[in-house]
Image: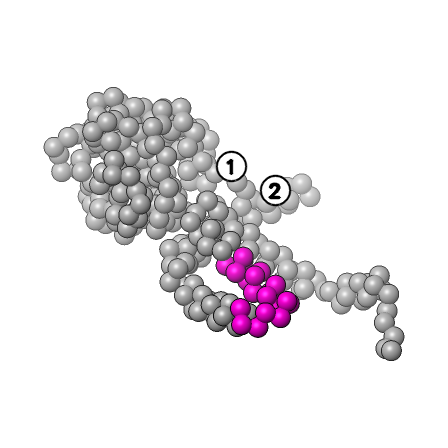
């Protein structure tokens, strides 16, 4: 019988082989996995990930129990599933690559300071409240980490400072800009009258019109926050990550909008900066 070291000595031997580069390697992988989780959180993709993990778990259990036929079928299914992953996760992969290309993968970008963010949110909420009361249809897209230059190119370039009166004039009924979407970047309205992609989700309520479907469609493809005012009922809604929250009042709208301009989450750059300050 071969001689085996006690578990504490085995553990100590493993630890002694870990060097600084190994620690750096583990840290980088942990950061990447965390950012992937944050990107998938509260999206339909997280449900697919859970399904894949369950399938892998069942495959391992069946293999351990020596259920050969079921194990063979599950192994083939897992192989086909990994081939289909790029198709199933196409929106999420596109989002990750765009984050990486824009240099925003390691941490969220803070577009405005607190005072500017509060001012923009206040002006947006004020304009939306008036449009809701007057039943003026509106579609306002708040750009976040992912650039929307391709969307803004479909409309009319404006680049104006955001105020409630300015937004109300953009969405005056029976004008060229009324039926399209307005794109907000930071504290400026960069374009109006823009075209948005419609969602292909057929399970949505028939109450949702073209504006709502366009809002959901864009939110499925990027991380933008889309505010919708119904022309029929004046209802205020917000679309994010392919989901829509409806029947909002002004205060709830403000609470949803604030993180879009100054995220409370600290990115890796902010953590490193704060660590240096403490030293």
| Residue 198 drawn at (x, y percent) | 25, 48
Find disc 1 in the rendering and name its residue.
Answer: 264
Pointer 1 and pointer 2: residues touching (CB < 8 Å)?
no
- Residue 262 left/right relative to 222: right
Camera-side residue of 177 and 64: 64
Question: Residue 90's image quarter?
Answer: bottom left
Residue name at image x 56 percent, y 65 percent:
59
Residue neighbourhood size for the residue with mark 1, other residues' Cα within 10 Å, grouped as few (<14), some (14–19), many (≥20): few
Question: Residue 250's image quarter?
Answer: top left
- Residue 6 left/right relative to 24: right
Q: Which residues are magenta?
A: 52-70
Find disc 2 in the rendering and name its residue.
Answer: 274
Q: What secondary structure characterizes most of the magenta part?
A: helix
Question: Residue 156's image quarter?
Answer: top left
Between the C-alphas of marks 1 and 2, the distance is 15 Å
Residue name at image x 86 percent, y 77 percent:
2
Q: Is residue 152 visible?
A: no
Camera-side residue of 149 and 74: 74
Camera-side residue of 100 and 140: 140
């Amino acid at each position: 019988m071969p001689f085996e070291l006690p578990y504490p000595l085995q553990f100590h031997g493993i630890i002694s082989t870990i060097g600084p580069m190994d620690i750096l390697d583990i840290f980088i992988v942990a950061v990447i996995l965390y950012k992937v989780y944050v990107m998938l959180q509260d999206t339909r993709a997280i449900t697919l990930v859970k399904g894949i993990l369950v399938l892998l778990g069942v495959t391992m259990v069946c293999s351990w129990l020596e259920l050969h036929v079921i194990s063979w079928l599950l192994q083939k299914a897992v192989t086909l599933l990994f081939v289909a992953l790029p198709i199933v996760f196409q929106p999420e992969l596109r989002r990750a690559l765009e984050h990486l290309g824009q240099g925003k993968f390691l941490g969220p970008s803070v577009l405005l300071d607190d005072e500017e963010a509060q001012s923009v949110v206040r002006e947006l909420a004020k304009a939306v409240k008036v449009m809701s009361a007057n039943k003026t249809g509106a579609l306002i897209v708040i750009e976040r980490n992912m650039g929307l230059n391709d969307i803004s190119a479909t409309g009319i370039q404006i680049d104006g400072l955001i105020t409630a009166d300015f937004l109300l004039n953009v969405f005056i009924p029976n004008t060229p800009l009324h039926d399209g979407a307005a794109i907000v970047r930071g504290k400026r309205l960069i374009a109006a009258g823009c075209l948005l992609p419609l969602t292909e989700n057929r399970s949505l309520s028939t109450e949702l019109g073209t504006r709502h479907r366009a809002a959901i469609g864009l939110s499925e493809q990027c991380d933008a926050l889309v505010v919708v005012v119904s022309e029929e009922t004046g209802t205020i809604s917000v679309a994010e990550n392919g989901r829509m929250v409806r029947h909002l009042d002004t205060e709830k709208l403000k609470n949803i909008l604030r993180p879009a301009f100054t995220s409370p989450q600290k990115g890796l750059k902010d953590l490193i900066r704060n660590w240096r300050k403490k030293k």
